[in-house]
Image (cartoon, helix red, strand yellow):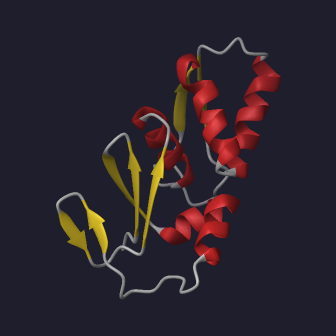
């Protein structure tokens, strides 16, 4: 059950707090900072309606294309990053403390020395969804 709403450029992304908690030190800190973490009695506005099952709502300043790649990665999918998105994804991974993703991006930087046209790499998770 998705219990987190993330807004990116007015688009809604529904996520699992457990996935975000496990993959991001930043989200772990945010979830643990709430005085009543995971309180199920809170209603969060979702556009014109109220979502009773959502427990957290965040807004991110990035592109939808970038966030969709980050989400795919943290959910265990292989992603292909084009050169025009590399810096933005690296910034999001760094700022939101997605350490595995940042590590993979640093490996690409070291291997390709910014001669990136398109890179495909897989998550180090053993439980791949594809």
Q: How many marks?
A: 0
Percent from the top left, x then y, of residue 126?
A: 63, 59
Side of 32 where 12 appears, left or right: left
In this image, 104 relative to 82: left or right? right
Q: Position of residue 98 (x, y in %)?
A: 67, 51
In the image, residue 66 lies at what x, y percent?
49, 35
User: Does 28 sit above or below residue 111?
Assistant: below
Q: Quadrant of residue 120?
A: top right
Front position in the image: 77 or 89? 89
Q: Quadrant of residue 43?
A: bottom left
Q: Is residue 50 left or right of residue 64?
A: left
Task: Say which of 100 and 54 sits in front.
Answer: 54
Depth check, front residue: 28 or 77: 28
Residue lying furthest right: 110
Image location of residue 125, percent across then percent down = 64, 56
Which quadrant would the N terminus be assigned to in this image?
Answer: bottom left
Q: Residue furthest left?
A: 48
> Which residue does the image show at 59% across and 30% down from the upper left?
88
Q: What residue do we see at 49% from left, 49% from top?
A: 71
Residue 89, quarter of the rendered image: top right
Q: Work out whether 79 lies above or below 113.
A: below
Position of 42 compared to 20: left or right? left
């Amino acid at each position: 059950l998705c219990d987190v709403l993330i807004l990116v450029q007015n688009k809604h992304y529904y996520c699992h707090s457990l996935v975000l908690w496990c993959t991001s030190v930043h989200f772990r800190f945010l979830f643990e900072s709430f005085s009543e973490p995971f309180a199920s009695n809170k209603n969060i506005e979702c556009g014109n309606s109220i979502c009773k099952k959502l427990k957290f709502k965040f807004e991110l300043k990035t592109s939808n294309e970038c966030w969709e790649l980050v989400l795919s990665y943290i959910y265990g999918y292989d992603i292909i990053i084009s050169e025009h998105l590399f810096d933005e994804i690296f910034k999001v991974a760094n700022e939101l403390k997605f350490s595995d993703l940042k590590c993979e991006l640093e490996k690409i930087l070291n291997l390709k020395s910014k001669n990136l046209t398109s890179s495909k790499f897989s998550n180090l998770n053993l439980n791949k969804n594809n």
